[in-house]
Image (cartoon, rainbow, N blue to C red):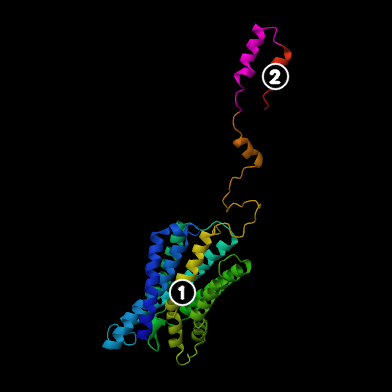
Amino acid sequence: MTIFLLISACFNLPFFARSIRDVLSPTRFQSMPAAPSALLTTAIAELSWVLPCLVQCALQTFRGNGPWSPQTSRLGCDVMGFYSVFGSVLGMTSTVWVAVITHRAVTGRAPFSAKIGVLTNVALVLGSALFCALPFLGVGSFVYAGEGFCYFDWYDPALASMLMIVVLACMVATCALLAMSVRRGGWPSKVDLYLMGASLLSAWTLWVPACIIGLAGGSFPSRYMLSGGVMGHAQALINPYVYGLRWRRSVLAMGSSGKGILVGAKLGAPPTGNQPVTSLSTPSQDAAMNVSPLPSPPASECGEQGSESALNPKVSKSKRNAVAPHIV
């Protein structure tokens, strides 16, 4: 397990570093200003779980039981339970937010601003921290679930019920948004959307039966918690590819093609309140703007000719009309 966590952390750390760089240099994401902060939150969700778990498991492997041991130490169990639930909830909710940004892009509405993106992700982090701190606020407790993991007490009705609500809500919302995005079209690669849904379901599907088993007072099958932990930590391997490479590349492609804001907008359709209005000039306006001032007629056609006629009455009418009149 220590080796698996080490490999997962090595995949997630570059994703985390590049997400920070994208947030600090957002010029490439002008079509979707909220995308960089969403990627950073997704990277934080997995790193906040896999990295401390790597440290704790490594200490357990090389130094045996101690204050860091989740099985024998109350402190070790509380620490592991806190970051495990935090990473789980933040991972699920950040996926919903990425799905919201994706769906908004393909519907052609104005994208979320960078400020809204930052505020939303801060709210997700704070909300996840508050949720996983419930045992410290007197709601249930963190317990050793077996097979090396501490988590919420699955047999506590309040914790199991709230966790199941969060998991089901995130799954339904994400899958619905992705399905509507696939149906509408406009995203550079539908494979991105399928992978996002598969990644979410593969990580948290076991959490729903776990909540039901806990509420029913049943017993967990052997290796159930180990399987759930491995599938959850596998997000640190999957997400750098799904979001850090594929989804990020599609966001940049939307921007370079000019489809980040008006995807799905029809030519000639009246702009909505969320679409930028472009001023279009009519052909008659263009012609009027391009008409050059009329040139002044030659002196021989106006002043000089008139003077010659006045001074010399014998000038013939044919001579006065010899010069063609100025045509406007």
Tell which residue pokes out farthest to the bottom in this image. Answer: 222
Instruction: Count residues near mark 1 (Cα–Cα under 10 Å), then give few for <14, some for 14-19, many for 20+.
Output: some
Kindly state the secondary structure of the residue where label 2 is placed: loop
Kindly state the secondary structure of the residue where label 1 is placed: helix
Q: Nearer the viewer, residue 185 or 214?
A: 185
Position of 86 relative to 71 (above/below)? above
Residue 4 inside the magenta-drawn segment: no
- Expressed as whole percent of the image width and height from the top left, the position of residue 145 reads 41, 86
Residue bearing mark 1: 241
Residue at horizontal 48%, vertical 67%? Answer: 249
Residue at horizontal 70%, vertical 7%? Answer: 314
Boundaries of the magenta span: 294-315
Residue bearing mark 2: 322
First in sequence: mark 1 or mark 2? 1
User: Residue 122 sits in which quadrant?
Assistant: bottom left
Classify residue 156 as left or right of residue 300.
Answer: left
Q: What amino acid type should be assigned to the residue bearing mark 1? A: Tyr
- Expressed as whole percent of the image width and height from the top left, the position of residue 264 reads 61, 60
Q: Nearer the viewer, mark 1 or mark 2?
A: 2
Q: What amino acid type should be assigned to the residue bearing mark 2? A: Ala
Labels 1 and 2 touching (C-beta < 8 A): no
The quadrant of the image that shows the N terminus is bottom left
Residue at horizontal 46%, vertical 70%? Answer: 245
- Expressed as whole percent of the image width and height from the top left, the position of residue 262 reads 58, 57
